[in-house]
Image (cartoon, rainbow, N blue to C red):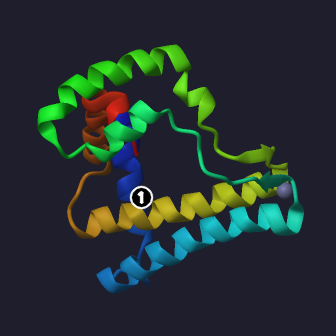
Amino acid sequence: MKDIIFDNFQNDVNESLLRHRSILDIMTKLTESNSRVNRALAKAVTDCGCISIYAKKQDIPSKIGELINSKNHSENTQKSNDEVNIDLDNESLSQQLTHQIEGNLCNNCREIIENEIGNNIFYLTSLCNSLDLNLYDILLKEENKINILGKYTFR
Ligand SMILES: [Zn+2]
């Protein structure tokens, strides 16, 4: 069912994109739409004020920091993963690491940001169309990657 929704969306995007069909237009529109998402978010902070950003260095437990640093040294990875698993369970890492946002989006800002994200997804889908890539397949691959590597991907 979900794959049908994705495929329908991908077809609809393909049929509705006429004027900016060149890959150059799609590439630059994708970048522009991404900037507009960030701009809308910045304006929610600086113009509207419904949310505030209080960014600082995140307090990452030292064992996890070590694992991130040694991620590419495969001989230590398995041992480190086991150690980190204990820490993650005990320390509820996701509660320690925050988005550093205070407040909630007002309805107006939410609508603007949703609209810009939708526009961004439109051009991302257009990029997939131009390269004959299937959006749903990409989503599944990404989901599998998360499920296999789990919390140890550290993005
Ligand atoms: Zn707002």
Q: Secondary structure at mark 1?
A: helix
Residue 44 left/right relative to 39: right
Give the x, y percent position of residue 10: 36, 55
Picture quadrant where residue 41 is located = bottom right
Q: Quadrant of residue 55?
A: bottom right
Q: Residue at x 47, y 63 (%)?
A: 122
Among the 4 quarters of the image, the one containing residue 124: bottom left
User: What's the residue at 22%, 67% (across, down)?
Assistant: 131
- Does residue 1 appear anywhere in the picture? no
Quadrant where the image shows the N terminus: top left
Q: Residue at x 26, y 36 (%)?
A: 145
Q: Which residue is mark 1?
A: 12
Total residue callouts: 1
Q: Residue furthest left?
A: 75
Q: Is residue 102 left or right of residue 73?
A: right
Q: Nearer the viewer, residue 24 or 90?
A: 90
**Percent x, y of residue 140:** 28, 37
> Which kind of residue does numbered mark 1 sit on?
Asp
The front one of 78 and 63 is 63
Crowd class of label 1 (few under 14; some 14 to 19; many from 20; radius 10 Å) = few
The quarter of the rendering in which ligand 1 is drawn is: bottom right
Looking at the picture, how far across and down is residue 16, in whole percent?
44, 69
Q: Is residue 12 above or below residue 79?
A: below
Residue drawn at point x = 37 percent, y = 78 percent: 27
